[in-house]
Image: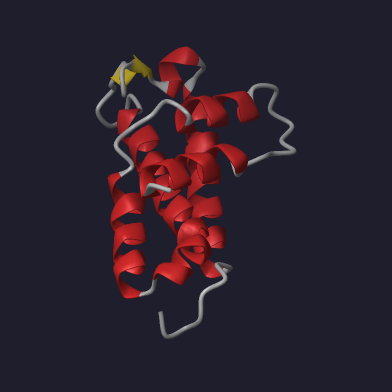
Amino acid sequence: MKLQTLFEEYLLNHLPKSQSFHPIFEKALQEMLSAGGKRFRPLLLLSVVQSYESLLVKNALPVALGLELLHTYSLIHDDLPAMDDASLRRGYPTLHTTYDEVTAILVGDALNTHSFNLIAHAPLSSDV
C-alpha cells in the first residue's frame, strides 16, 4: 500500500474526538483536517522510517499524524485576524471565517495538544 493511502486512511480513522462543551468544536476540527493538503511532513517521516525499517511504518503512523496535527494547528493560528487574516486555506474558508475566532483558537490549541500526546505515546522504541 502506498504511504499516502496508508496515511490518509489512518487520518480518517483517527480523527480527534472531543467531549467539548463547544457545540461545533468537533465538526470544525474534522473539517480542517479533512480539507486536504499535501501531507508533506507525515509522508516525509514515513518515507524515512520505511527506508530505515519498513516494519516500523505502522508504528510510526501516530507520529506522522502528530506532525500533521501540529502543522494544521500552525495554519489555523496563522490565518487568524491578528496574524495573516486569511479568508481561504486549502481552497476552503478558514475556520475563523466559517465559525469565529474563539472556535479557531480552541481547535488549533486542541490540535497542538493532541499532536504532542500522539508523539509522546507512539509505540516506537527510544532508539528510533
Q: Nearer the viewer, residue 34 or 72?
A: 34
User: Along the line of sight, which residue is nearer the eye, 59 or 33?
Assistant: 59
* Residue 27 in picture, x, y percent from top left: 61, 24
Q: Horizontal placement of 27 versus 115: left or right?
A: right
Q: Is residue 53 above or below residue 127?
A: above
In percent of width and height, residue 106 lies at: 54, 36
Viewer-proximal residue among 103 and 27? 27
Q: Residue at x 42, y 25 (%)?
A: 35
Expressed as whole percent of the image width and height from the top left, the position of residue 76 reads 39, 33
Scheme of image coloration: secondary structure
Expressed as whole percent of the image width and height from the top left, the position of residue 29 reads 55, 31
Total labels drawn: 0
Q: Quadrant of the C terminus?
A: bottom left
Q: Residue at x 74, y 32 (%)?
A: 21
Q: Residue furthest front?
A: 1
Return the residue found at the far left: 84
Taking the spot 55% from the left edge, 59% from the top edge, the residue there is: 118
The residue closer to the viewer here, 31 or 36, is: 36
Whether 77 is drawn above or below 103: the answer is: below
**Horizontal relation, residue 109 to residue 89: left or right:** right
Work out whether 72 lies above or below 62.
Answer: above
Q: Quadrant of residue 87?
A: top left
